[in-house]
Amino acid sequence: DIQMTQSPSTLSASVGDRVTITCRASQSINNWLAWYQQKPGKAPKLLIYKASSLESGVPSRFSGSGSGPEFTLTISNLQPDDFATYYCQQYDSYSQTFGQGTKVEIQ
Amino acid sequence: EVQLVESGGGLVKPGGSLRLSCAASGFTFSTYTMNWVRQAPGKGLEWVSSISSSGSDIYYADSVKGRFTISRDNAKNSLYLQMNSLRAEDTAVYYCARGSTSYIPYYFDYWGQGTLVTVSS
C-alpha cells in the first residue's frame, strides 16, 4: 500500500497567519491527491483534489500545490473557522490511504 | 442537494455482526462509486471498502477482508456494509462517502454524518 506521511501532526497558529501542511507519498501517485478538513464530531469536508484544484464553494485562501512525492496545503490569512484537523489522501489506486492528520490549533 | 444518511450502528459483542446502511439522495446514485471510510475514536481516517456503480467491482482493505461485505441496491438508492466477526479494533465511526466519479481514480466528494459502531463485551 502507498503510505502518506503528513507533517506536522500539530500546528499552533494565530488568526491571519499563513500556514503550510506537508504530505509525502511513498511512491508516485500521479498528483491524485486530495485534502480534507474535519472538525470535531463532523464528517470530513473536501477542500482540494488533483493536488491543486479547489473544490467548489471552498474559500480561495485554501490552496494546494506540489507533485510527487511531496504536496502542500496552504491556508493564507487563517480564519477562526479554519481551526480543525486536515488530512491528505492519495487516490491513485482503489486502496486509498490517508495521512495521519494535522491539527491546526489556536496559538 | 446531495445527502448521505448512515444508520445501523450500535454496541455489539466481539464476534458479533452488524449491518450498516446508507441512504442516498440528491444525485443519480446508480452512476457513482460508493465507499465506506471509518475513524476509530481519536484516530485518523481509514478507507474500508468500495463498490462500483453497477456493483460489479468491489474492493476491501486488508483489515476487513473476509469479514465485511459491501453491497448496494440502486433501485433503493442505498449502500450497505455487512460486518461479521467483529473485533474491538473495528470500533469506529463509519462514514458513507460518494466517489467523485464512477471509475478510478476518484476522491470522496460527499460524506454522510457517520454512524458509531462499538465492539465491546
Image: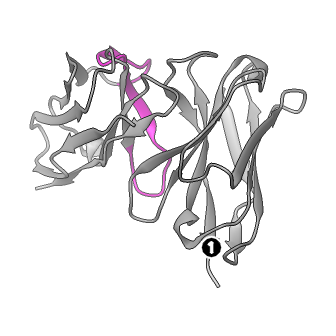
Left or right of residue A107: residue A31: right
Q: Looking at the figure, which quarter contains the N terminus of chain B?
A: top right
The residue closer to the viewer here, A73 or A89, is A89
Name the residue rendered at 80%, 35% in the picture: B72
Provide the secondary structure element on which disc 1 rests.
strand
Q: Is residue A42 magenta?
A: yes
Identified by mark 1, the residue type is Val
Left or right of residue B61: residue B23: right
The residue closer to the viewer here, A90 or A35, is A90
Residue B113 visible in this rendered orientation of the protein:
no
Q: Looking at the figure, which quarter contains the C terminus of chain B?
A: bottom right
Report in which chain the residue with disc 1 lies.
B
Q: Which residue is mark 1?
A: B119
Name the residue rendered at 74%, 34% in the picture: B24
Looking at the picture, the colour scheme in use is one colour
Q: Residues within 10 Å of mark 1 (few under 14, many from 20)?
A: many
The residue closer to the viewer here, A11 or B99, is B99
The residue closer to the viewer here, B85 or A16, is B85
Left or right of residue B33: residue B20: right
Q: Is residue B88 above or below residue B100?
A: below
Name the residue rendered at 15%, 31% in the picture: A77
Measured from the top left, where is residue B115 in percent x and y?
64, 57
Magenta range: A38-58
Measured from the top left, where is residue B98 in percent x and y?
61, 30
Residue A92 visible in this rendered orientation of the protein:
yes
* Magenta-colored segment: predominant secondary structure: loop
Q: Is residue A22 above or below residue A83?
A: above
Measured from the top left, where is residue B27 in percent x and y?
72, 21
